[in-house]
Every structure is written in C-alpha cells, then in structure tokens.
Image: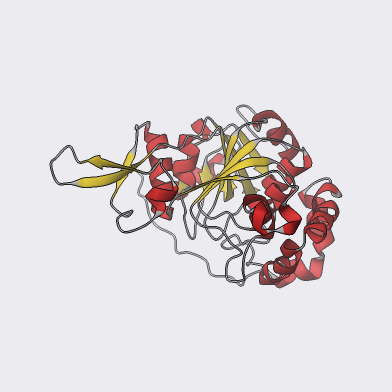
Amino acid sequence: MPGSKVASMRDAVAALVRDGDTVAIEGFTHLIGFAAGHEIIRQRKRDLTLARLTPDLIYDQMIAAGVARKLIFSWLGNPGVGGLGAIRRRAEPATSGEGRDLPRLELEEYSHFGMVGRYTAGAANLPFYPLRSYFETDLPKANPLIREIESPYGDGVVYAVPPLKPDVSIVHAQRADANGNTQVWGLLGCQKEAAFAADRVIVVVEELVPEDVVRADPNRTIIPGLIVDAVVVEPFGAHPSYVQGAYDRDNRFYLEWDAITRDEPSLQAWLGEWVYGLDGRAAYVEKLGAERIASLRPGSAPSGSVEYGRYE
C-alpha cells in the first residue's frame, strides 16, 4: 500500500525504541498501551526514562523488568486498589528489604497539570510552560526543575516547568488509516501533546480503516499521519485498561495485581508467564480466554452522525 506505515509491534519497537531513550506511553484511564509496554519488555530494552501522567500497572511491569533508570510522572498507583510494589522497591530500597539489591529508580515528580504543561511546551517548542498551581505545595522543594519566575507583565510570580520532548511517544487509539491519521473518542488525555512533542511516534490501534473513513469524520483525528512513524494494529492491545466502545476495564486484573506486585518473586513469575513466555498480543489474548474477553465487551451506544456539508 503506497505510503503505508503499518508495521508489526515487534518491528516498530525494534526500529523506533532505543536503549537510553525517553519513552512516553500516554492514554488517560483508557487507551493505555499495555501491548507496546510488553513488547519493550520482551525486547529487553534498557536504560529508558519513562514518562507518563499516571504510571500505573504497565510502568510497574516495565520497571520490574529492568527497562528503566528513571521515571517522570505526576501520580502513581494501582487506581482504586493500592500501590505499585515494583516501583516502590526500586525507588525506596532502604525501606524495603526485597529492594535493597535492586537498581535504584530515579524519580522526577510533577502535578498532572505540570506534566501537561511540559508536553505542551515540548510540542510548541517553547522554553518553558508557566502555571500557578504550585503555590502552597512542596513539589518545588522536591523537584528543583519547578522554578519561580517573575511574570514579564508585572503581575507577580508564577512557576515554570521545562519542556518534555520524548524520543518516542506511544499512543493507543481506536482506529487509524495506513498513513497514521489517528482517531480517538471517549476520554482524552494528553496523547496529542505527547505525540507532537516527540521525535518518533508509534500509534497502536484496535482497527485499521480506509482513509475515507477518517476523512468522513475529521474532528476525531487527534494525531495527523505526518508525525507518525509506525501504525501497529493490535486488537485488545490496551487490556487490562479499556478502549471506549471496544471493551471495558478488566477490574479483576487490577485487583489481582495488588497481590502480585507486593511480592517480587510473584511479579517476576507473572512476567515470565504473561510477557516473556508469549510471542505477542495475539497469544496474550488467547491465554486470557474467550469467556473473559466476551465478559468485557460493552453493549451498543452509537454516536449520532453530523452533516459537514459539501460544496461543489
């Protein structure tokens, strides 16, 4: 297909994710790129800086696998359940007997808005992003990259955060065409900003569609193909998070992860069975089983169509 950017997950990660890179896997609540994270683990990438607003289970798994030296984030945890044991053991080895012999993880913490501001500055090629929300917090004390600056318009002091420009941003979405024009619906995070800020972009989608499908509904296109390097078609690639309209959040998985992450041997055994022991997402879905997959399928709730108008 002329101009096609379609690639396998294995080939996209091998070509575009390099040891030492800063990698952002973005998607807020849903559309979290578990399949991409698992392939990075499988290829044993090393010395990565991982960036994400909410490093949840996927970054816990990646850090447990030893791919990262640093985490740039704004909140971390197992949403609605508890903590992330692998990250804690590597970030606080002095307080965790099991973590004392593990490589220490460097942390760089911001608020959600601070991370969004960093991506926005990176996308717009700005030297910093100003915001007021760090007043009366201790984050500037914990992170010297959050700095006070005088407003050039004489209305006092604000805080500034530096631009974040990932080497690679990975975004999961509902659909794209072969050229990488990517469409999302449902809850949006900062996928667009992370993609525009990055040097290289991998889009992972549930479905590949013809270009005329994208052109018929252009307002859903959050990432244009001109900045995309690879399009990977990976159905169920965001499990156990959800994809609006395709499958629901697997709450059972999040509950089960709490026990797994508390124990380093259990976590390593899980990685061996569910990541290293499988050759890709299709094998992962098969292992989950048809009954569990079917239980996550939503009912139908189609969106209304609009008339854009055509002029000759």
Q: Residue 274, position in %: x, y?
A: 81, 55
The colour mode here is secondary structure
Pick whichever, 30 or 221, lies toward us.
30
Q: Is residue 99 toward the left or the right of residue 185 in the image?
A: right
The quadrant holding residue 291 is bottom right
Up the image or down, 178 lies above or below 52; here it is above
Pick whichever, 295 or 241, lies toward us.
241
Pick whichever, 310 or 227, lies toward us.
227
Q: Residue 190, position in %: x, y?
A: 46, 49
Q: Residue 166, position in %: x, y?
A: 52, 35
Q: How many marks?
A: 0
Could you tell me which residue is drawn at 62 percent across and 34 percent down? 230
The quarter in which the N terminus is drawn is top right
Q: Is residue 29 toward the left or the right of residue 39 in the image?
A: left
Q: Residue 38, position in %: x, y?
A: 73, 47
Q: Is residue 216 visible?
A: no
Up the image or down, 115 lies above or below 44; here it is below
Could you tell me which residue is drawn at 73 percent across and 38 percent down? 8
The quadrant holding residue 294 is bottom right
The quarter in which the C terminus is drawn is top left
Q: Is residue 48 visible?
A: yes
- Which residue is at the far front? 94
The quadrant holding residue 284 is bottom right
Pick whichever, 119 or 223, lies toward us.
119
